[in-house]
Image (cartoon, rainbow, N blue to C red):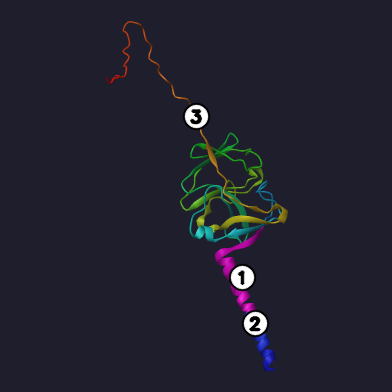
Amino acid sequence: MVESKSEMREIIESLAVAVLIVTFVTVFIGRFCRVKGQSMEPTLHTAEWLWTDRLTYEFGTPQRGDVIVLKYRDTREKYVKRVIGLPGDEVEVKEHKVYINGQALLEPYIKEAPANDYAKVTVPGDSYFVMGDNRNQSDDSRGSVSYVPRASIEGKAIVRLWPVWLLRVFMRPKIEMEYDYKAPAYNTPQYDGSVSPEISRPEIKINQ
């Protein structure tokens, strides 16, 4: 009888430790998330599993290009999107391109160019402007998601674990700005022949 109680106690203690470990990991380190929907195609697809890291943003802030998991408003629903605008940025969609502070972004990861324009807005402080990579099939900051407060960002998508043959570590893409380069005008002096141009010659010394 005593031995039976001891075994039961060990089982309960083991379960309690397991629960504490799982709780600690999911609250402070990260968690698994299952993708649902097509808003992040071609980067992510329905039924894929991600590992979302929480620690990254405990020691830093979300950066442009990060794929994040966010809490949708005051619901329990979670969305996965890409950070496009940072606090204070001006964001605009026109001519089938996304503009940040007046400069067009070069985005190799999107499924297709955005079909509709979006009037210029300024991202509030401590908030982020997010978009899906499938620009024309995504409810994001252009729609009901609106600006995402920092507190609503639950973590950064680090790795796709399933399916295993599509295993991928998500590195932050290099999002470049598309600048309109104009060659400077050069004014070349014109010689009219009236005055001989002076040509300076280096002095050469010869040691005899």
Q: Horizontal and vertical percent for residue 16?
A: 62, 78
Q: Is residue 118 left or right of residue 163?
A: left
- Mark 1 and mark 2 residues within 8 Å of each other at the beta carbon: no
The type of residue carrying mark 1 is Val
The amino acid on which the numbered mark 2 sits, given as a three-letter code, is Ile
The outermost residue toward the left is: 208
The magenta-colored residue range is: 14-34
Within the image, what quadrant is residue 10 found in?
bottom right
Secondary structure beneath dot 2 equals helix
Q: Nearer the viewer, residue 7 or 179?
A: 7
Give above or below for 137 relative to 80. Answer: above
Q: Is residue 34 above or below residue 17?
A: above
Query: Outermost residue toward the bottom?
Result: 1
| Residue 207 on the magenta span | no
Q: Which mark is residue 22?
A: 1
> Is 71 situated left or right of 182 in this image?
right
How far separated are the C-alphas under marks 2 and 3?
69 Å
Q: Would you place residue 10 above or below residue 203 in this image? A: below
Give the residue at mark 3.
181
Q: Of 22 and 144, which appears nearest the observer? A: 22
